[in-house]
Image: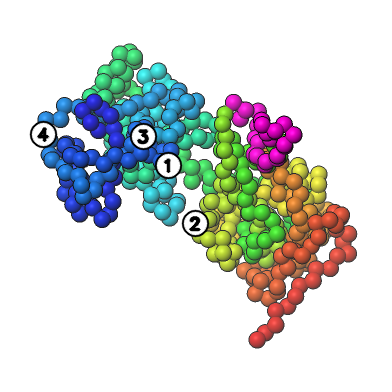
Amino acid sequence: MDEEGTQYHARNFNQNFSRFRHLLKEDESYIVIKPNMVAVTNGFSYTGHKQTLTLDWNNILKKYDDFSGPVNGFMFVDFNSIIEQTCPRDTLFDVIGQIVSFRPLETSNLVASKHYIKLTLSNLDSIHLKVTIFGSQAYQMSEYLKNNLTVNCVVIVMQFLKLNIWNGIGEAKSHFEVTKLFINSDIYEINEFKNKLKCHDNVGITEKSITTLQSYYSLYTDDFKDNFPLKIVCEITEPLKEMKFLLVSSIVNIRQNLPWYYEACNKYGKKIPRVPKVNQSYTNTEKISETIVVKCTNAHCKKYEIHTVIKYIIPINVQDCTGTIGLTLFDREAKRLLNISAYELEKIHEAFGYLVDITEYNVKNYNNIYIVLKVTKDISIVYELESKIELMSIQSVSLNQVALESDDVVQPVQKDVISQTDESFTPSTVDKSTATSPSKILTDLKHNLQEIYDVDSGDDLSSTKAKRKSTGEETLVLIPKMEK
């Protein structure tokens, strides 16, 4: 930052770092002789300035003790401009506000830089802005809140934030280690903000308090407790009614004949179809060409310039001791598992807990490929669900009879796989779910069919065959593995 408050993004390449390392100190001032200014070519600038300063062997840096420019050079933006996404998108910005609520530090990800804390800030006009802080700054914020429980008014300044859009609403998030965090610091901007708060609030800022909200992890895992019935595969091979239920099973394969991703609108996350566009030449009216473009059908997107983002839609087969069934993992749930490669995902045979949804679409179309609403690999939750299944087997009147909610006998079915979401996916191919006879279930809950049988993935089935309901006469064929 120069004495006029103009900020520049400066960089120093590895081969020149040893020369400047001892000079790179925060809050120190230098005169740069023979500066090397390079234009920003990637469209994004940390400071909004379209040139960067590159330190190389031609530069000379001399210490300067008479710097008269701003101390921090904050560039605050209005909360409404962030929420309405009218703030700069190709640069970073600063915010100041009072913390009114926060969620505890989220550390479920194995990568520490992806640990985060979510805050809600309020400005002097009582407009609320959601902010997400990642990495070391998240730990800094969390430690302060833990160690200062009696401090009711916490005003923070966050410098170098980036716009984040969630469900069509603008938010702010930290940007790697670039972001700087000032928490109730004794600086002019925070002191001035607090003085204005006192003028706005007749009861004084000491009576304000910070609300601690439930962590997202707790909210997420609560649904695996006692909110939904626990099922086994043979009970849900036929979509007899709409319901949400819990399932404990292992991934046995990923269906290779279905797409793993789709293109979605960056604003609202809806699927975007590719449509042809006719182009007519201005010089030759008879010359017409056709190109393929993406077009969002959401009415709210018409006033915005949109682009596509790639989202996951992973078709998996899962298995418990009673059979195999197809499920679909969408973007959020897939990302919870995809800290590993897709190849490694296919090789995982440990049990997961699923919250599964049988929708109206499944029932009307007799389609038994269900959507996963939530997935967890929390050992304590999975163990608790497995223990409940064991208890269910003990309480059964007979191992030869299973009490189902329907009087009909559940049989294996073969249905078209519909990868359907709010984005209105269309039928794509067929797959099949298998279940053993009800007389054989629950005899060995730890028994894995894959150790004995080759499970057919259904990749060779035709998508043109008409759908049919099970007749009760179908025979499940399992191929024994040969001993070597």
**Which residue is the site of mark 3?**
50
Picture residue at 30% right of the left edge, 13% below the top: 199
Q: Nearer the N terminus, badge 3 or badge 2?
A: 3
Q: Which mark is residue 339?
A: 2
Q: Amino acid under label 2?
A: Asn
Q: Nearer the N terminus, badge 2 or badge 1?
A: 1
Q: Residues within 10 Å of mark 4 (few under 14, many from 20)?
A: few
Query: Between tags 3 and 4, which lies in front?
Result: 3
Q: Quadrant of residue 158?
A: top left
Q: Position of residue 159 (x, y in %)?
A: 32, 34
Picture residue at 45% right of the left edge, 23% below the top: 80
Q: Are marks 3 and 1 in contact (CB under 8 Å)?
A: no
Query: Does the rendering let one see residue 390?
Result: no
Picture residue at 64% right of the left edge, 65% below the top: 252
For marks 4 and 1, give the CA distance.
35 Å
Label 1 residue SS: loop
Q: Is 291 colored magenta in this rendering? A: yes
Which quadrant is home to the C terminus?
bottom right
Left or right of 76, for residue 433: right
Q: Position of residue 58 (x, y in %)?
A: 20, 47
What's the magenta region?
A: 279-303
Query: Does the rendering let one see residue 283?
Result: yes
Label 3 residue SS: loop
Q: Nearer the N terminus, badge 2 or badge 4?
A: 4
For marks 3 and 4, give the CA distance.
28 Å
Q: Position of residue 54 (x, y in %)?
A: 28, 44
Picture residue at 31% right of the left edge, 42% below the top: 140
The answer to whether residue 116 is above or below residue 127 is: below
Q: Amino acid under label 4?
A: Asp
Left or right of 477, for residue 131: left
Q: Position of residue 458 (x, y in %)?
A: 75, 64
